[in-house]
Amino acid sequence: MLDKIKYTYDYDKRADVLYITTVPPVPSEGEENNNGIEIDYSIKDGNPCGIKLIGYKKLGWERKSEDIINCVSTNLNTTKKYASSMVQKINKEINNVGI
């Protein structure tokens, strides 16, 4: 069932990276693409368990809510509704803006 696994997020201002990870976190290895997105996979079972948006502010991710929603829902096997709710919280807490 989608949304059975819960996720949390954290923004590292110094590194300019937004982390979205499973709760509880699991040991993982990441695979980065050319767009500043790194997908983390569980070492134990190979399932996706997190996303890092590298260069969050520098690359303008704070203005790309729909892209983040699609990335989270596609790669972390969750619904767009759950991903949208998370992005709204991220925007409110990190960016002080609505979706």
Image: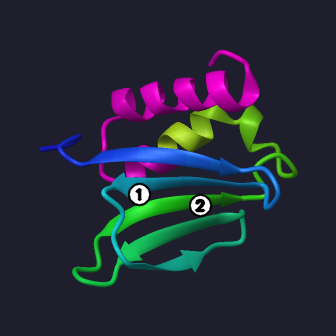
Comparing 73 with 12, the one in front is 12
Comparing 36 with 89, the one in front is 89
Sort mark 2 into few (<14), some (14-19) or many (20+) by Cα contacts within 10 Å: many
Q: Are marks 2 and 1 in contact (CB under 8 Å)?
A: no
Residue 80 lies in quadrant: top left
Earlier-in-chain disc, 2 versus 1: 2
Q: Nearer the viewer, mark 2 or mark 1?
A: 2
Quadrant assignment for the C terminus = top right
Q: CA distance from mark 2 to mark 1?
A: 12 Å
> Magenta span covers which residues?
71-99
77 horizontally vs 14: left or right = left
47 horizontally vs 59: left or right = left
Residue at the far right: name it.
Answer: 58
Q: Which residue is mark 2?
A: 52
Residue 97 lies in quadrant: top right
Residue 49: image location, x then y, percent: 36, 64
Q: Is residue 19 above or below residue 90?
A: below
Q: Main secondary structure of the magenta part?
A: helix
Q: Which residue is mark 1?
A: 75
Disc assigned to residue 90: none
Q: Is residue 68 above or below residue 41?
A: above
Residue 36: image location, x then y, percent: 71, 64
Q: Residue at x 73, y 20 (%)?
A: 96
Comparing 17 with 79, the one in front is 17
Q: Is residue 70 above or below residue 27?
A: above
Could you say whether the residue bearing mark 2 is in a helix, strand or loop? strand
Residue 68: image location, x then y, percent: 57, 42
The amino acid type found where label 1 is placed reads Asn
Q: Residue at x 64, y 73 (%)?
A: 33
Q: Residue at x 40, y 51 (%)?
A: 74
| Residue 28 inside the magenta-drawn segment | no
